[in-house]
Image (cartoon, rainbow, N blue to C red):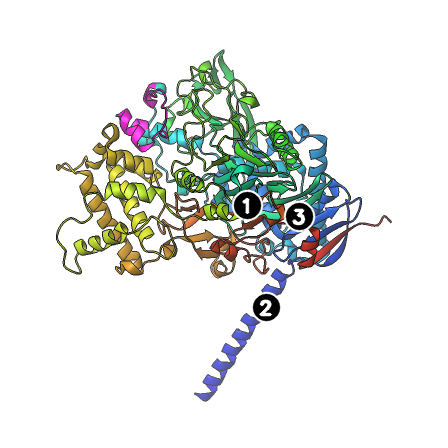
Amino acid sequence: MIATFRWSLRIFAGLALLALLAGALAYWFAARSLPDYDTTVEVEGLTAPVEIVRDNADVPHIFGDSDPDVFFGLGFTHAQDRLWQMTLMRRTAQGRLSEIFGQRTLKTDELLRRLDIYNLASQSVAAQSPETLAALDAYAAGVNAWLAQVNTGARGRGAPEFWLFPPEIAPWQPADSLAILKLMGLQLSSHLTEEVLRARVSLALEDEARIEDIMPDVPGPGIASLPPYAALVPDAPGLPGGTADRKTDYADFLSPVARRGLGGASNIWAAAPDRSATGGTLLANDPHLGFTAPSIWYLARIELRSGGVIGATLPGIPAVLLGRSADLGWGLTSSYLDDQDVHIEKVDPDDPQRLLTPEGYRPMRTRSSIIRVKDSAPVTVTLRWSENGPILPGSHFDLAAVTPPGHVASLAWTVLSPADTSMTAAMDLMQSRTVADGIAAAEGFIAPSQNLVLADRRTIAMKTIGAMPRRDEAHQSMGRLPTPGWLPQNRWDGRLPYADNPEFVDPEGGILGNTNNKMIDRPFPGHVSFAWGDTQRIQRWRRLMQTREVHTRESFIEAQLDTVSFTARSLLPLIGADLWYTGEAAPDGTPERLRQRALDLLASWNGEMNEHLPEPLIYAAWLRALQSRLIEDELGPLAAQFTHVEPLFIERVYRDIDGAAAWCDVIQSAAVESCLDMARLALDDALIWIAEEYGTSLESLRWGDAHQAMQDHPVLGDIRGLGWLVNIRQSTSGGDNTLLRGRTKGTDPHPFFNVHGAGYRGVYDFADPDSSVFVISTGQSGHPLSRHYDDLGELWRRGEYIPMSLDPDLARAASVGITHLQPAKSE
């Protein structure tokens, strides 16, 4: 017995030692790819030495004798800290994810091949200015210089992920940077999905007024009514043809296709000198994208011949896309410009390779493409194009539900330009000195369309940038529904002049801003958009801006971090009007008593979506359950596409606008339900769900427990045992419709997890530019073992910032290391 015990102990100790050694070995291999920031390196491709000063937040300050050398340094630092992220985005744009992830990403690869993103980026290289080409070449040389260090210096394959996936990394090319910029267009675009969904809703609902309820126009001057989709495209199959859940359409963890409600969004506002307490202009910007670890943004400062520039970059792109120089600040929001049209193309019944055009049937352009798939046979895809754009099969974007037999769907989209000069525009903007210069520089920006807000020391302005398609006034759906692509009135005729893009310079009130709201009302076809990203945040922003005569950096920060929900304040009195303070007190332990407790909490709540309060969770669960009850019987499977509460829909129903209260009656039941019945039943549904997930002690609920920021590693985060190391989870305030935007996931399980928000925040004060501040939501490094992997994340969660200074002495005084890049000596 004793001998057995001794041997068991020895075996256990041996196994424990082996596990410890294996862990230590894994750590050693993974840690080899941590860069040394305090070193001197000889590299190929430099004309003179480059100095990279890393401040204590790991923000690189890059100095060189020429602009190309500085861009070389930026490429080197991006590769040091975000090599895996860069190569993954490149693979995504190329449609080559399946080579390492297998069948799981095959549909994503197929879509990117059909859109031909990478080939179009390669063609666009020749369209760039000579200065931009020099910057792209130098940046690529800097990335490749770090790859050379990885290959020759035992750098642990460059990133720990390469120990789990093929370590081969192709040299960086200028086309790679352009492809990543185009890829952002896919992440920010939403009009394709809106067109298809509107068509499906039109097929499901016979009453046009009910379509306007669930997909309403933004309040304001209206537009002419649309024809039913069935009148435009007869024989479309409707619901049975395409009910795929968007979550399964593409591999969520890597797909650049955003689900409905999770496309691009942002906040930005600026104050003129007469509305600033210090007499200088102010600018605040926080763009909203899907959360990942590391953040998509990377902070950097580059010292160009035109002066220093500091702000947010995208790894893979040699430009400060959001930030400031000593004289000019700039920021972006998604404009929601309608830059996509779906066309239904008629196939020649005698020749499936030909499509109908205004001049008769003509052959499609085709090309074969081979997708290599890990652990499977290669897949050959035939890529096809109509005169309007690439052909997309019905398996994508639920197009099968709106495409009748004998037809196919194509996509017209401004991103699909082979002469896209957006990168040159971004480079020129970064080196502009004045608002006028910045507006002029952005003329060459094609896509994705953005609202550009600028502030120099005297002037503020907002300009919508990006190509505006020129549509015919007789367009059958005004771009809101798929339309027959063979009819000339439905086709684009080039682009509108840049001067037609909305522009606001030095507004009379001295304040301008955008929260993806409807910003202009012009008749079609100069309308910009019919589908806007926000109707709610702008209401709160306007109040905050108007309550002060003058603003400061601190008041702009306060607005960025504001968590009060205008939506909650406006909707709760409507849906709860006949529930509050009615009826007798119910016995403890009954559903009625729980409902009364919930209503009592909400009655005294001010709409603040604070992570420590219970009311935001009760409110959010109630509204979600209410919308589900209102739409499920009318829309059936389509109801699953409406994953987030539509505030204008709820308001229309409870104000009975144009008979919208009809949604409250359950069609399948014999009784006639009222909106009061729906509100009460939905509240009970919500409280049952809360009790199952969080318990019945309503007063002890915390919104932050349900609203955790999901900053997950897109690959390692799903691997058992690694998630705790690489995923960054944080309790957060805010919600879908607050200025501190924390867009919820919208789907089970955990529908209120925070998955989309401000990965970058910056506030620039031109009375004292070096007092400007910024922050990102994770850390600078993409290496999970780096102390800079998540060190900025806690500051971001608490609403804190770090200095945004162009003073080189400050950077050196607080540096964590200085890298000296030296030109390689010729032999």
Mark 1 neighbour density, 10 Å: few (under 14) some (14–19) many (20 or more): many
Foreground: disc 2 or disc 3: 3
Amino acid at the residue labelled 2: Ala
Sooner in the amino-acid sequence: mark 1 or mark 2: 2
Amino acid at the residue labelled 3: Leu
In space, the residues marked 1 and 2 are separated at their CA atoms by: 43 Å
Q: Which residue is mark 3?
A: 806
Query: With respect to residue 796, does 336 lie above or below?
Result: above
Amino acid at the residue labelled 1: Val
SS class of the residue under badge 1? strand
x, y (%) of residue 186? 51, 36
Query: With respect to residue 365, does 425 lie above or below?
Result: below
SS class of the residue under badge 2? helix
| Nearer the observer, 405 or 709 | 709
Foreground: disc 1 or disc 2: 1
Query: With respect to residue 103, does 36 lie above or below?
Result: below
Does residue 709 appear in the picture of this structure? yes
Total numbered circles: 3
x, y (%) of residue 222? 36, 23
The magenta stretch spans residue 372: no
Sooner in the amino-acid sequence: mark 3 or mark 1: 1
Q: Which residue is mark 2?
A: 24
Q: Which residues are magenta?
A: 202-231
Does residue 487 appear in the picture of this structure? no
The magenta stretch spans residue 209: yes
x, y (%) of residue 141? 72, 43
In space, the residues marked 2 and 3 are separated at their CA atoms by: 41 Å
Q: Is residue 483 left or right of residue 331?
A: left
Mark 3 neighbour density, 10 Å: few (under 14) some (14–19) many (20 or more): many
Give me the disc on residue 574.
none
Q: Which residue is mark 1?
A: 763
